[in-house]
Amino acid sequence: MGRQSMPVRHNSRNWLRRSLYGLLIVFLAVLIAAVCIFSVVNANGLQTAVDRRTKAYVSDVTFQMAQNIDAQLANVMQTLEMLTDSLVRIDGAEHRMDFLKQRAQMLGFTQLVLCDVEGEGICTDASTHNFSGLPGFEASAAGERGVSFLENQRILYTVPIVYEGSIFGVLAGERDKANMQALIATDGFDGNSVSCIIDRDSNVVISPTNLDFFFALDDLFVANKDPELASAVREMQANMQANVSGVIVFTTPDGVDVIMSYDPLETFDWVLLTILPADIISHDTDAYIQHTFRLSTAVIVLFSLILAVMCGIYYSHRRQLEHIAFVDPVTGGMNNARFQYSCRRVLDGAKPGAFTVVSLNLMDYRLINEIFGPKEGNDTLRHVMQVLGRHIRPDEAAARGEAGHFFLCLHEHREDAVIARLEEIRADVNAFNAQRETPYYLTLLAGAYLVQEPGLDITVMQDRADAARKSKPAENGRCAFYDAGITARMHLEKELVNLLDSSLANRDFKVYYQPKVRLRDGQVASAEALVRWQHPQKGFIYPSDFIPVFERSGDICRLDLYVFEEVCAMLAGRLAQGAPVFPVAVNLSRRHFQTTDFLQRFADIRDQYQIPGGLIELELTESIFFTVGDILNVKEAIRRMHELGFLCSLDDFGAGFSSLGLLKSFMVDSVKLDRSFFLDDSQRAHDVVESIVELARKLGIETVAEGIEAPEQVDFLRSIGCDLVQGYVYARPMPAEELEAWMRARHGGEVTQV
């Protein structure tokens, strides 16, 4: 038995051994199969992953390329728009063209073109063309950015030229084919890619420098032999119309696998088309792990470089925008926006009364511009700004507002400390006179607001400092401080503005007439219409109290129209009665010049009352010539007045800084010599008046002396040939019926037709 049992155990061990071997073989076979399958699946998966990553990589890079091209195209339009901002401040067509010639090559334009709204354009190469009909020009003429395609793949970018809300021209910039090809040239994908820009209808806008590869694809896309490719092309065309990017993989006729990426551009509805080899990532899939690692590293480096470049471009553009937004273009210092930002930052959390906002105004700044020229005026502004910068502490701010207006935010809480600081600034501003044989002292008028309410809007603080400077001119040029009295005056001004509507409706405003007497024969030649306010509750309100208020609020235009209509009604009544009529002068506020073709409304009212031309004279104050900004607008307004049948006179001549050149440049019918001429009875003053009268006579301009109170003044004016006199020496302003009685008494019961 023992011998029989041993073979059984031996056979059992052999079976077990064979079973183990079989299991091991199966395991190894399964393992080998699994490894093979895993290798195949992994290879396929890796290939799929590589393909997917290749597509993603291409999409990302071409997207960045599209973004970069978009940024460059947008920068072109922004550059043109910044040029238009400069153009509207340049007087004279020749100076504008010189400015554009200097900027054209500097900014990469083949040429710049200045067009009027009719399409007539002058190029920087001195040629002229008509651009009307081009879609880009028409878009810009309507106020939008535009682009047009010219011959030889030249691009014409256009932007509107806007001034005071009106479009009066178009600025165009041309870039040639080489320049545009440089726009899409890229070193991405190791230089193996080719790009072009097409429109949504697949028309080529900008072709690449090397066209061979694109031409080789024509037959493939036109024939559409491959159904999948034909479907992909149709999908691509639909995506381009829907502003969706995508990637197509296909094989060229010569057997090269390529990837074509299409990325819509936000600018002008264009599409960036990029073609590159499909093996851009995996050059040798047999060494896929190592290559994948290396390529992944390269991708990371490439994306890092792209990100670094984009960050550099972003921060560069941001610095440029901050410079535009926060730097005064004349002085290089803070502008008002930056000042308000800086003030808000230091005042947030500050104790009441810790800071003071100061308003400074460079007195006679416009006179400096007129006498010495704009360059010297700008140099003066820079000088003042540099001085302010030297006197500002780290937690303080100084900025230029507009014209000769500056603001300070000082860390001072006492009036005497503020005054001392400002005296130091005034002394430093005028320190240059120590080197001058003939000194020219600059005067800074100052108003200050001690900030008791740090949470107030900065604009309100500036307004309070302005109000102090304007309403309380301190002696010896010292600073005036905002107080409750100014607030009370502001409330009074608000009350007057609130009363205006009801007073206009109730006809509480009365029109008085002051006659102008002709010295040659003593007859009344004309009259000036002056407004008086008799309020039922407030009583008589002086013009000096309400007219400046309405000037500041803008309501003066409504009051002017009211007075104008009252004058028309008076003249119409006299005409209907057959009574003699004479020209009446109506004052015209400079506020009207902020509205395009404002004169048409006056003409409509006059025509409504059927007043003949030549019976109404519009009086302009000389300040209009310095505040409207564009003298061409004033000239055009005077021409328009004459065209509509109005007379035009220049009031308060000599009250400010009138130049005799105004008489030459502006075709006014008469000038009114300001009463300040006649407060000085010296021979020198008489000589000045006589010279002005003589010059006006030679130019065919009628002269009126206003504010005359003494007979001796009348005798002098008659002796030098002055035409008309207006003043208390003859009559005060009076209602129309009293004027009629006064004229009858003066002329023995008769009023003759002028």
Image (spheres, rainbow, N blue to C red):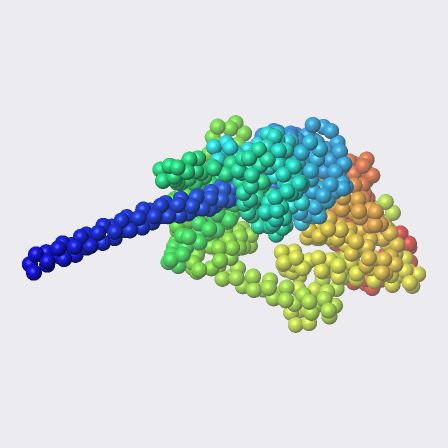
Residue at image point 79% right, 54% down = 600
- The x and y percentages for residue 240 are 61, 48
The furthest residue to the bottom: 537
- The x and y percentages for residue 378 are 56, 36
Question: In the rendered image, is residue 573 in sight?
Answer: yes
The furthest residue to the right: 578
Q: Nearer the viewer, residue 406 or 314?
A: 314
Q: Nearer the viewer, residue 265 or 710?
A: 265
Is residue 450 found left or right of 563 in the rendered image?
A: left
Compared to residue 182, the image places residue 568 above or below, namely below
- The x and y percentages for residue 738 are 81, 63
Residue at image point 89% right, 52% down = 754
The furthest residue to the left: 2
Residue at image point 51% right, 49% down = 337
Q: Nearer the viewer, residue 82 or 561?
A: 82
Q: Looking at the rendering, which quadrant does residue 499 occupy?
A: bottom right
Question: Quick one: quadrant of the N terminus?
Answer: bottom left
> What count of labels does the image hold?
0
Residue at image point 47% right, 32% down = 190
- The x and y percentages for residue 54 are 47, 42
Is residue 195 found left or right of 653 in the rendered image?
A: left
Question: In the rendered image, is residue 658 in sight?
Answer: no
